[in-house]
Image (cartoon, rainbow, N blue to C red):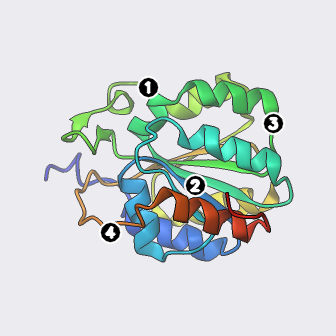
Amino acid sequence: MSAAQSKGIDRRAFVRQLVEAFPQALVVTGLGSSSYDLYAAGDRDENFYLWGAMGGAAAVGLGIAIAQPTRTVIVVTGDGEQLMGIGALATIGSQQPANLNVVVLDNGHFGETGMQRSHTSLGTDLATVAAGCGIGQTVRVDSTDQAGDLFQKIAAAGGPLLATVKVLPDELPRALPPRDGVYVKNRFRAVLGLAPM
């Protein structure tokens, strides 16, 4: 690994720290590694794993945030997945849900398709894009000692917020969450006091 590649945060440790800081938060994950990271931090009924809906995590998180305005909602996704769903940022900016936080684990690569460089390693700044879409709070986390500042902003519920967390481009062992979408959906609905569907 080159010196440039060795810069970044341990994604699994960061996600574990995030969940520990917000144990009651409703957490939506994007395709692939973000779901593995959340599951590795500990499976919870409040976790909503998206298996194959690439680009959908922020949009799903927005819907949940609007439907559950008193709950903290955190979307944990990757840079490739968020680039696929970039239009959701404009809708988040227009809706302005104070309880929605989009945390992009940015390794500068498309991890699920072979670690090709993503647009974020080629000049696209998702925080700047989010600000242009009307998301008033953007945060960049380059080191673990900056995590506390991000967590304070999430706790203040002054969102919407988008954070880009610069993580190492590691290919970590997969920690596979439940693949039964109906099961994941119904246990998440139960946490919200809703009947199964």
Disc 2 marks a residue whose amino acid type is Val
Question: Which mark, residue 96?
Answer: 3
Picture quarter with the C terminus: bottom right
Q: Which mark is residue 175?
A: 4
Residue bearing the label numbered 2: 28
> Of circles 1 and 3, which is in front?
3
Provide residue 155's location: percent of width, then percent of height.
76, 63
**Residue 128 on image: x %, y %:** 58, 28
Question: Residue 34, relative to residue 120: is it above or below?
Answer: below
Q: Earlier in the sequence, mark 1 or mark 3?
A: 3
Q: Which residue is mark 1?
A: 124
Instruction: Residue at 75% x, 60% y: name it.
Output: 72
Up the image or down, 137 lies above or below 157; here it is above
Q: CA distance from mark 3 to mark 4?
A: 33 Å
Residue 112 is drawn in which quadrant?
Answer: top left
Disc 4, SS? loop
Q: Does dot 3 land on a helix, a strand or a loop? A: loop
Residue 27, percent from left and from top? 61, 60
Does label 3 or label 2 sit earlier along the sequence? 2
